[in-house]
Amino acid sequence: MSLNWSVVHSLSLILLEFDDAANLLAANPDAVTISIDEPTEKTKKKHGHRQDSPREEDEELLGTDDSDKTELLAGQKKGAPFWTFEYYQTFFDVDTYQVLDRIKGSVFPVPGKNFVRLYIRSNPDLYGPFWICATLVFAIAISGNLSKFFIHLGKPAFHYVPEFRKVSIAATAIYAYAWLVPLALWGFLMWRNNKVVNIVSYSFLEIVCVYGYSLFIYIPTAILWIIPQKVLRWVLVVFALCLSGSVLVMTFWPAVRDDNRRIAVATVVTVVLFDALLAVGCLAYFFDAPELDVLPPTVLPHNGTLRITKAL
């Protein structure tokens, strides 16, 4: 009997509590009731999301040590030997938007911004530099042949013959510049890095990437070199050299500015001189090369002697 009485008493108290809550809501509809038994999970989740969201955004943008270690271990596990195709496939793992963004950055360099840190360091590639060099080779070779054709157009003694050897010469010069100069510069920076503690270091792939994208401005310049005006050609080559050289200077000056002052200045000047040598050399050889005198057919006079005359 005592147990039943306690159960009945508890039920009556619960009903009385519901009646009080109903009367309160009837008197004040805007009143808020709180349940003690049920925790405010939604409120906790909401506050927890607000507190964690800035941290998650920072981790997404900057990354944490754990994520870096995980990526590093994953890269070590998935790394393929250098003699396999999969090893070199990673160097071409880049999308079109990244390539276009890097081309835009090389054509419109931002003053005071490092091209490697701004565009390359997240994912250096060889896809863009390879095709930029290949396009530049054919642009120079074809434009050089067309320039010669337009200069001699209308001359009866001129017979146009395409010079396919210009393709191989242009390819040798451009690919040698795009690979050998970065290799020498990378070796020099590594050597100076052992002597100077605070010097900035770049990988060989990053340097090749910078040199490759810096050559893009010469593609439209080579096409415009078809116009047979020497003054215009030299204005274009100076303009292209300023853009390409500025990308190289703003990239490699931070790497050597903590070194000896003379060595730093000499390094940057050498980088610009090699760039100017490539530009001026291509213009002088493929477009402003001196033309040979055209020899007409030999004429046999009445006295039987052979005479060769030069066309003025």
Image (cartoon, rainbow, N blue to C red):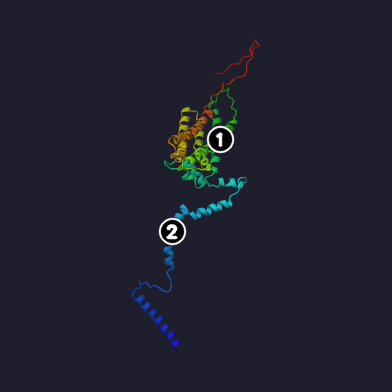
Q: Is residue 118 above or below residue 181?
A: below
Near-viewer residue (169 or 272): 272
Specify the amino acid type for callout 1. Answer: Ala
Specify the amino acid type for callout 2. Answer: Ser
Residue 174, position as x, y percentages in the image = 55, 35
Residue sitting at 52 percent across and 53 percent down? 69
| Residue 180 quadrant | top right
Residue 172, position as x, y percentages in the image = 57, 34
Near-viewer residue (276 or 219): 276
Left or right, 303 with reference to 10: right
- Residue 224: tell me if it is visible: no
- Tell me the distance, in whole angstroms, between the alpha carbons under discs 2 and 1: 50 Å
- Outermost residue on the bottom side: it is 1
Question: Which mark identifies residue 67?
Answer: none
Image quarter in which the C terminus is found: top right
Tag 2 residue: 53
- Residue 117: tell me if it is visible: yes
Label 1 residue SS: helix
Residue sitting at 53 percent across and 53 percent down? 71
Residue 220, position as x, y percentages in the image = 50, 36
Tag 1 residue: 176
